[in-house]
Amino acid sequence: VLALLLASCAPPTLYDWGNYSQSMYNFYRDDNQAEQYIAALHAVITTNETAGKRVPPGIYAEYGYMMMSSGQTAEAVAFFEKEKRFWPESELFMNTMIKNVVSGGKLPAPPVKTAPVDGAPPAGNVRTGV
Amino acid sequence: MSMTRAKILLGMTALLLISACQTNPDNNYSAFRNADPKSILIVPAVNKSLEVTAADYYLATIGIPIAERGFYTFPVHIVKRVLEDDGLSDADLVHNAETAQLAKLFGADAVLYVTIEKWESRYAIFATTTEIEIGYVLREGSTGEELWRHTETLAYTPNAGDNAGIAGLIFKAIAAAAERAEPNYIPLARSANALAVSRPHQGIPAGPYLDAYGKDKADF
């Protein structure tokens, strides 16, 4: 009911995300839901492609990653390539992921703790009615 | 009484949703306009609540609203896994790493840091309130300059109506128990994100994939 209520006042969306968010949530709650998460990603891809619509950012890549995790390297590379083709912003990252699949290696580790970042927003915001 | 029955009863009741946000003066968007980010890297959220699962569950809600603002969003699940593989399994470590290094690793124009300040459900026999408070900071990818900062608070209390007498009390107790058993965190998080990013003078200006890109200077 809450979801319906909230959806009713949401603006029209750029993309059709299908069950992406809910299935990722279910997957995080329960590792056994990996298959359902993969199926949801696949459904987002096929639904949009069939409708001639742009597949939302990151979906090809997320699917490719799940393929990579289950050892389907050719599939993984194919979907990382797709992400790169449709979303040029992802080029650098996808090239790294493809290298990763091919070499079976890991990404170079980013340096940690060089400059402390003030990530927290200021406390004490006004919260009326709560 | 079974949960299913409780849910049906809850479904018949009205809902009360309370939203509140910072009453700060409007954000200054000059840094954002200068940076003009096209892609946003969302790193795992820092969790300051007592619910250990909050940060992981939250991650499932934040990718879509940023993408719907017209930005390329890096896939949040891979980002999380890649950072974990590289020894940054703790979100605090990620948030303390240098922004420029993170952005460079993924090729991102900007990095979004989310902090879960509150994620809780307070049970009372006749009224359970679920509340979340989310802090957002967006930083430019090469300089680490702050481009946007916002805090969003959202609370939800099932309202079982004003029926008098024992029946009314029973309805309220059922609604409160159902919310306690299964708090509505995820719908709340989705709403908080949507409100946070799109509210005029408070949210994020439209990104390149929205028609409003570059034309919304009256609002941001």
Image: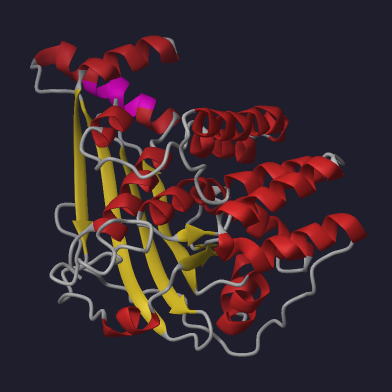
- Secondary structure mostly seen in magenta is helix
Residue B128's spot in the image, x, y percent? Answer: 30, 36
The image shows a total of numbered marks equal to 0
Side of B3 relative to A44 (left or right): left
Residue B157 visible here: yes
In the image, is A29 to the left or to the right of B47? right
What residue do we see at 49% from left, 63% from top? B48
- Would you identify the image quadrant in which residue B14 lies? top left
Q: Where residue B80 appears, x then y in whole percent? A: 65, 58
**In magenta stretch: residue A55:** no
The image's colour scheme reads secondary structure
- Towards the viewer: A103 or B26: A103
Q: Residue at x 53, y 85 (%)?
A: B142
Q: Residue at 27%, 84% (x, y): give it.
A: B30
Q: Is residue B98 visible?
A: no
- Which residue is more in the foreground, B72 or B172? B72
A119 and B68: which one is in front? Answer: B68
**B140 vs A31: above or below:** below
Q: Is residue B165 above or below residue B83?
A: above
Q: Quadrant of the N terminus of chain A?
A: top left
Position in image of residue B71 (x %, y %): 43, 60
Q: Which residue occupies 46% across, 47% down?
A: B61
Relative to B155, say whether A22 is above or below.
Answer: above
In the image, the segment drawn in magenta is B172-178
- Is A96 on the left or on the right of A10, as rendered? right
Q: Is residue B167 left or right of residue B144?
A: left
The location of residue A21, given as percent across then percent down, is: 50, 39
Residue at the outermost right position:
A103
Vertical comparison of B89 with A61: above or below: below
